[in-house]
Image: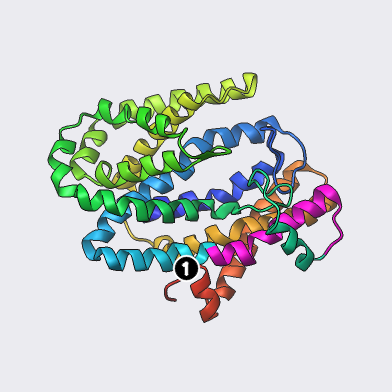
Amino acid sequence: MDNIRNFTILLLFPVHTFMIWNDFGSKFYIWAGENKILSTAIVLINPWFMPLLFVLAGMSARYGLKRRTYREFVKQRFWKLGVPFVSGTIFLVPFQTWYARKYFDSYQGGILEHLQYFFTHITDFSGYDGAFTPGQLWFILFLFLISMITLILFKLLPYEKLSEQIEKISAPVILLLFIPIWGMYYLGNFGGFSIGKALALYVLGYYVLSNDAVMDKLDEKIKYFSFICGACTILSAALYYRFSYYGDGWVNFIGWNWILVLLVLGRKYWNKRTKFTDYFNKASYPIYILHQSVLVVLAYYILPLCHNIVGQVCLICMGSFVFTMLGYSIVRRIPIVRKMIGIQSL
């Protein structure tokens, strides 16, 4: 799980770089125009890479609750999720909305003046217009709320009471679980960010995909699931590139299928500790918090200097990774800042 989580978070650098050229109609904090190839690349990754993080969080919660009491779990979630969300919303996210106003509106005001605007204006929560947004911290907010809400469910319906019934579920039925995920997508949906879907993925991670018998059944069918994944991904690329098709049911089916395949393959081939694992287990969460603000600021300065799109993509993607890692290496050594971004220890 650690290796998959770390790899998924690193994907945020290319995905959010490509967003600068998205053709979805919603633009981005810095937007350089539409590019169909880069937008299609986003469409192929989006269905699974953030949903996968909610599934992994649900799986981790089951293992975490085996080691901690409910009180200890709540305390850990408060410091790991609640504090970084509040501090990041106050001290980090406003910078990327400030640069959005500078880029789109030629805004000349300073950051202090912008902070007043940021905290007093609410529009669509995207932040692309400079108004209030949780930015990339939406994931942390959703996860914190879901972690607290589901404790009631987990206490009333312990994993042990359902494990035997869950073990009897066949692999095709597990694939069909995309249907309730799809249904929950419309619950608490804020511009495509659905707390209902996130809740469903988290609960399925906790009860279903943390079950070894379930994973064994999926492993037996991995060739079929992988074939479906590959074929649907190729079809999805063609449908979006040619017709801009991105239907909700289709997206949820492909995303769930990819999650199952990646978990099985990760369990089979990447179930080992490496230097990559040891380093990024501590770094990935702060990287998630920091990366988008760094990327937006860097894009603001790179786009006017480099006029070749390949060069722009490479400089923004690689540069944001380098500067984010530098930022992480600095803040992890400052005790108060370390706690503000959820780093428990060096």
Q: Residues within 10 Å of mark 1 (few under 14, many from 20)?
A: many
Q: Is residue 255 left or right of residue 29?
A: left
Query: Which x, y percent locates residue 170?
Result: 21, 29
Residue 96, magenta (yes or no): yes
Answer whether residue 282 is visible to the viewer in this image. yes
Q: Residue at x 63, y 67 (%)?
A: 91
Answer whether residue 271 is visible to the viewer in this image. no
- Looking at the rendered structure, the secondary structure element under dot 1 is loop
Q: Residue at x 28, y 47 (%)?
A: 206
Q: Is residue 222 left or right of residue 162?
A: right
Colour convention: rainbow
Q: Residue at x 53, y 51 (%)?
A: 138
Query: Which x, y percent locates residue 89?
Result: 60, 61
Q: Nearer the viewer, residue 168 or 161?
A: 161
Q: Is residue 2 left or right of residue 95?
A: left
Q: Residue at x 32, y 50 (%)?
A: 150
Q: Is residue 188 left or right of residue 94?
A: left
Which quadrant holds residue 310?
top right
Which quadrant holds residue 32?
top right
Which amino acid type is marked by label 1?
Answer: Gly
From the image, tell me which residue sits under label 1: 342
Q: Nearer the viewer, residue 250 or 39?
A: 250
Relative vertical location of residue 271 with respect to residue 337 in this rendering, above or below: above
**Quarter the C terminus occupies:** bottom left
Query: Which x, y percent locates residue 112?
Result: 76, 68
Q: Give the magenta range.
A: 86-109
Relative vertical location of residue 235 with respect to residue 36 in this rendering, above or below: above
Query: Which x, y percent locates residue 29?
Result: 71, 48
The main secondary structure of the magenta stretch is helix
